[in-house]
Image (spheres, rainbow, N blue to C red):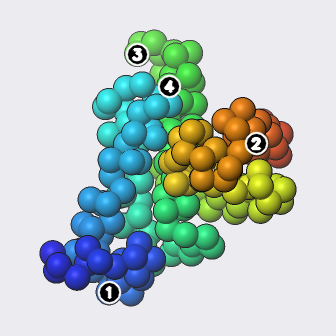
Amino acid sequence: MSKSHTTYSAEKLFSLLQNNSDPAAFEELYNRYWLRLYMTAYKRLSCKEDAEEAVQNLFESLWKNRHKIHIRTSLENYLFAAIRYIVLHTIYKKTATQSLPSQEEEVSYPADNSCEENILVNDLTSQIDKIINGLPPKCRQVFELSRYEMKTHKDIARLMGISEKTVENHITKALHQIRTSLNHFFFL
């Protein structure tokens, strides 16, 4: 890998990946984001193997679909929104498989839906971005610092000159708005 890749922004690396299929750019993105994406997945899944698989699936999809992906925000926002979707999908699959028939019963498995999943991820990301952009400015800023920049409540409070309780209230409000607005994605 070229030393210069480490100095590039995520967006520049993704541009190199899209336009030149640059494996060094992909490797730098992988090294830069793997641990944070893994920690995000692990927080929700509480299973090392599932979290690793979720991150692996994300990077595999990023490589395979690099020419088709259109990012409307930042690459970092896209990656964290995608890992959240993959985690939700993993949780859904685990709960669905708990009620599957035994091996003796005939089972038909659905076809590979990776293209449909990518479309859903893009739609979901777009919808989440719209919801976040519609939040009051201070609430949006607190939410973005918490979820996208992974800052603690204490750090956000200090940075913005507000109490930790106010930070909690803003995040609770933002999450409530997102959940309420996204109900139709999960209950069709």
Tell me the CA gap for discs 3 and 2. Answer: 48 Å
Among the two numbered marks 1 and 2 on one chain, the one whose residue lies closer to the N terminus: 1
Residue 184 visible here: no
Q: Give me the disc on residue 103.
A: 3
Q: Amino acid at mark 3?
A: Gln
User: Mark 2: which secondary structure?
Assistant: helix
Which picture quadrant has residue 65?
Answer: bottom left
Q: Label 3: how many residues lie within 10 Å, few (<14), some (14-19) or many (20+)?
A: few
* Residue highlighted by disc 1: 20
Q: Amino acid at mark 1?
A: Asn
Q: Residue at x 50, y 31 (%)?
A: 44
Tell me the CA gap for discs 3 and 1. Answer: 46 Å
Among the two numbered marks 1 and 4 on one chain, the one whose residue lies closer to the N terminus: 1
Q: Residue at x 49, y 62 (%)?
A: 76
Nearer to us: label 3 or label 1: 1
Q: Give me the disc on residue 94.
A: 4
Among the two numbered marks 4 and 3 on one chain, the one whose residue lies closer to the N terminus: 4
User: Mark 1: which secondary structure?
Assistant: helix
The x, y position of residue 154, in whole percent, is 57, 39
Q: Nearer the viewer, residue 157 or 61?
A: 157
Relative to residue 42, is residue 48 drawn left or right? left
Nearer to us: label 1 or label 2: 2
Among the two numbered marks 2 and 4 on one chain, the one whose residue lies closer to the N terminus: 4
Q: Residue furthest bottom?
A: 19
Tell me the CA gap for discs 1 and 4. Answer: 37 Å
Looking at the rendered image, the quarter that the N terminus falls into is: bottom left
Nearer to us: label 4 or label 3: 4
Q: Is residue 75 above or below residue 144?
A: below
* Residue highlighted by disc 2: 170
